Structure formats: C-alpha cells, structure tokens
C-alpha cells in the first residue's frame, strides 16, 4: 500500500471513530449548538458508561484491591500559593508559534472587587495529593511505601487543542503519587511500570500499538528526574497515552512537608513515583483498539470489540416486533427487567428491524443481543447473538443471567 493510501486510511479511521461517537451517543462536541469551543467535549450516555467502566477498573486495581493506597477527591481551585510552590506559575509554559511563552493554566478569580484573588483551575490532579499528604498521614498513619490516588478533571489552556479528545483543554486524569524512601525509587519505578502495563492489558488496549519512550533530559517536566511515556500508535501519529514520572522529593520539599518514620523515629522527605493516566486518551485508544470491520458477502460490518467489563452495554434486549404487545410484555418483564436489575448496563432496543438493531449494538460494542420471538412465548427460550462471531444460540430465559455471567468471565 502506498504511503498516501495509508495516510488516507488513517484519516478515514479517525473520521469513522468521531462519527461513530456522535451517532451512538459516546462523545459530542462541547457547546455544539453554538458552533462548539475548541478543546471541549461532552460525553453522552454510552461514552459516560464507557469512561466510568475504565475509571472503575482503574480504581478497583489500584485502590480497592490494595492495602497501601488512599483515595482523595480534592478541590479543583486551590490557594494560588500551591501553584507557586509547585513551580507551575513560573514553569508551566507553552510556547506559541511566534516564540512567546505563556502559562497554560486557566486563570479565574475568587471573590469580588479589590479583594478578589487570582486563582487557577488545576492543570493536574497531582497537587491535590501533595497538599493533602499531611492530612492523609495524620488520619491513616500509613507506613512507607504508600500511595494516594485521585481521578478528576484537569484544565490546560492548550495552544493547539486537536485530534478529537486526544488534546483537550478540559480533560480527566487518573493519577497516583506513590511515596517511597529515596533509595528505593528505582525499584518502585520498575514496579509501577509493570503495573501500568498489566492494567493496559486488562482493559483491552491493543498492546502491539503501545510503546515505551524514555524521555530525554531536555524534554521532561520541571519536576521530573526520570520519565517514561507510554505512547500509542494513534492514526495521527505515535503519541503519549500515559506517563510514569519520578518526581523526586520536589513537591513535598517545596510544600515544606515531611514524614516521620515511626519505626525508625526519623524525619524524612519521601520521594515520589507518579503513574499518570488520562481518561479521555484511554477512551480514544480503546475505541481505536476495538474498532473492527468485518467484510462478509460484500458487506462491511463495523463493530467495537470491547471487553464486556469495559463495554458501555453488556446486553441489549429486543422484542422481535414492537407492535406485538405479547412479545413486548414478555421481553420487558421476563427478560429486560431482571437483567437490568442484575447488570445495570442493559439496553432496550426495539427500533427498526432486527438487522438494524444488531448493527447498532455492534457499533456500541454490546457483546450480546437477546431477541424475544414467537417461540419464546411457548418454550421460554430466547436467541442470544454474539457480537464478534454473529453466531446465535437458543438459551432458556431462566438461565440467561448465569449464561451472561459465565460468558463475561
Ligand atoms: P502531552 O506531552 O501530550 O502534552 P503531558 O506530558 O503534558 O502530555 P502529563 O502532564 O504527563 O501530560 O499528563 C498526564 C496524562 O494526562 C497524559 O499522559 C494524558 O493521558 C493526559 N493528558 C495530558 N494533557 C492532556 C490533554 N490536553 N488532553 C487530554 N488528555 C491529556
């Protein structure tokens, strides 16, 4: 294939993803009815479910299943002294095309009149952990090593927001600050490197498209002594998906915070390993990993091959015909209601013919489509169609919950 064709295909792929996201209620342009605002996007019902599943999987692995991690949900606007101490007021600069430097933090004001304070929307969630370091230590008395984790919004006045939800001005981060003794930093850097890779596999990223880049001396953030970028082959190039940074004791030192090691009765400033992941870039990279086109009998069937724990919908329930009250009644009360109560992420789909419903659910990434037809009324079985193979099975209604549970495990 020529280079020109490859580039065209990649552009087409992005166009297909952006249009699928709008058509199927994943992601919309922000303020669209007023012409949009560059760098801002809104998540629709399915995009929200998808992003929530990603966040839940992250929280489960890195917080709930561990004994050494403490969650925090800090405010977005801090006393501006935080950003002076962290180095962001002087160091968080972007360079414009005509060579001018400007600060990427969004400014706002707190209070009114002459007493108003110039403040900033946080450009990273990380400082929310550092400024609550002492509170967390005092409340929970953790021993080193231990970590703090936060999922939340971050804001950056990016000079050139682009590539859909890849580079936004408002986005969401999932960050961990892991506090270690200075001499242990290399060990834990390696440890978090492999933990991050294992989570990427868990959620279903195409690992052949993930590459590690050792970030050189001149390119690291002002606080970092070592950084690895986990890059992903996006259609618009190989770009940063996540980062892993060794922040040394830079932040705690600048906030004048330290830690008493109770066992050794000594005062130390812990060093920090920071795995940092973007929710929106995860959404985009997963959509690109999952997007598949199957060509059969001259027809193209696009579908999202998402893992069931990440897919926005686990199963869709359909009465074969929506104008047959006995089918609708059965599908609603005996199939949809119990599955909805069990799994939550269950869709009711009676729009258009069955073929159209399958196509729609394929694009949403729904692993199973369940159809209630006339046979169901006499034998209490339904058709379950598999998203990836298109194969259909007859399953007893009373076995549906277990069938789905087994399949998703
Ligand atoms: P880049 O070099 O692409 O600007 P960065 O190195 O500034 O990214 P970090 O400061 O390390 O990014 O932020 C941590 C994570 O937050 C990134 O790995 C990415 O997943 C996400 N992220 C950062 N900036 C944006 C943005 N403008 N839009 C969406 N996600 C972002």
Image: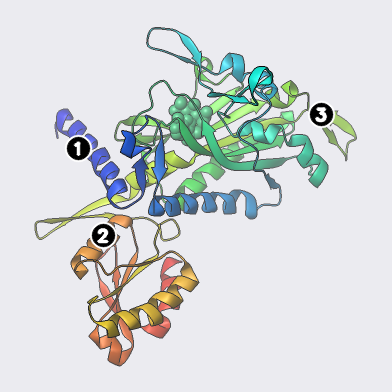
Q: Residues within 10 Å of mark 3 (few under 14, many from 20)?
A: some
**Mark number for residue 32?**
none
Q: Secondary structure at mark 3?
A: strand
Q: Are marks 3 and 2 in contact (CB under 8 Å)?
A: no
Compare marks 3 and 2 and give the one earlier in the sequence.
3
**Foreground residue among 143 and 50:** 50
**Mark number for residue 360?**
2
Q: Residue at x 71, y 52 (%)?
A: 67
User: Relative to 298, does residue 234 appear above or below in the rendering?
Assistant: above
Q: Which residue is mark 1?
A: 9
Q: Secondary structure at mark 1?
A: helix
Q: Is residue 184 visible?
A: yes
Which picture quadrant has residue 285? top left
Q: Residue at x 81, y 28 (%)?
A: 268
Image location of residue 201, percent across then percent down: 45, 49
Compare marks 2 and 1 and give the one earlier in the sequence.
1
Q: Are marks 3 and 1 in contact (CB under 8 Å)?
A: no
Q: Is residue 141 visible?
A: no
- Disc 2 or disc 1, which is closer to the eye? 2
Q: Residue at x 71, y 35 (%)?
A: 179
Q: Which residue is mark 3?
A: 268
Q: Secondary structure at mark 2?
A: helix
Q: Residue at x 35, y 64 (%)?
A: 367
- Disc 3 or disc 1, which is closer to the eye? 1
Q: Residue furthest bottom?
A: 378
Q: Left of 89 or right of it: where is 23?
A: left
Q: Quadrant of the N terminus?
A: top left
Image location of residue 172, percent across then percent down: 50, 39
Compare marks 3 and 1 and give the one earlier in the sequence.
1
């Amino acid at each position: 294939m020529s280079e020109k064709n490859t580039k065209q295909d990649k552009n087409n792929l992005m166009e297909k993803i952006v249009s699928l996201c709008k058509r199927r209620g994943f992601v919309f342009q922000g303020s669209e009815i007023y012409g949009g605002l560059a760098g801002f996007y809104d998540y629709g019902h399915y995009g929200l479910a998808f992003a929530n599943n990603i966040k839940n999987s992250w929280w489960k692995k890195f917080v709930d299943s561990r004994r050494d991690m403490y969650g925090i949900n800090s405010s977005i606007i801090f006393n501006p002294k935080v950003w002076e101490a962290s180095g962001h007021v002087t160091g968080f600069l972007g360079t414009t095309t005509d060579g001018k430097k400007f600060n990427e933090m969004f400014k706002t004001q707190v209070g009114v009149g002459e007493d108003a304070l110039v403040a900033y929307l946080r450009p990273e969630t990380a400082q929310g952990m550092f400024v609550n370091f002492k509170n967390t230590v005092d409340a929970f008395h953790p021993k080193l090593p231990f970590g703090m984790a936060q999922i939340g919004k971050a804001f950056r006045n990016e000079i050139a927001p682009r590539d859909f939800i890849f580079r936004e001005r408002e986005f969401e981060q999932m960050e961990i600050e892991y506090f270690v003794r200075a001499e242990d930093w290399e060990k834990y850097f390696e440890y978090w490197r492999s933990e991050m890779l294992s989570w990427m596999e868990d959620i279903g990223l195409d690992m052949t498209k993930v590459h590690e880049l050792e970030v050189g001396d001149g390119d690291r953030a002002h606080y970092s002594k070592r950084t690895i970028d986990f890059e992903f082959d996006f259609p618009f190039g190989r770009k940063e998906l996540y980062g892993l940074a060794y922040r040394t004791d830079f932040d705690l030192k600048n906030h004048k915070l330290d830690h008493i090691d109770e066992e050794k009765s000594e005062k130390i400033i812990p060093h920090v390993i920071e795995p940092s992941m973007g929710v929106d870039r995860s959404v985009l990279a997963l959509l690109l990993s999952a997007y598949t086109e199957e060509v059969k009998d001259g027809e193209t069937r696009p579908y999202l091959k998402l893992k069931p724990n990440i897919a926005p919908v686990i199963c869709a329930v359909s009465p074969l015909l929506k104008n047959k009250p006995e089918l609708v009644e059965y599908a609603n009360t005996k199939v949809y209601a119990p599955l909805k109560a069990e799994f939550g992420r269950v869709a009711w789909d009676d729009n258009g013919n069955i073929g159209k419903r399958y196509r729609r659910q394929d694009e949403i990434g729904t692993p199973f489509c369940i159809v209630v037809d006339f046979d169901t009324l006499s034998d209490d079985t339904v058709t379950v169609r598999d998203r990836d193979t298109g194969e259909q099975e007859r399953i007893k209604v009373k076995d549906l919950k277990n069938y789905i549970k087994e399949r998703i495990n």
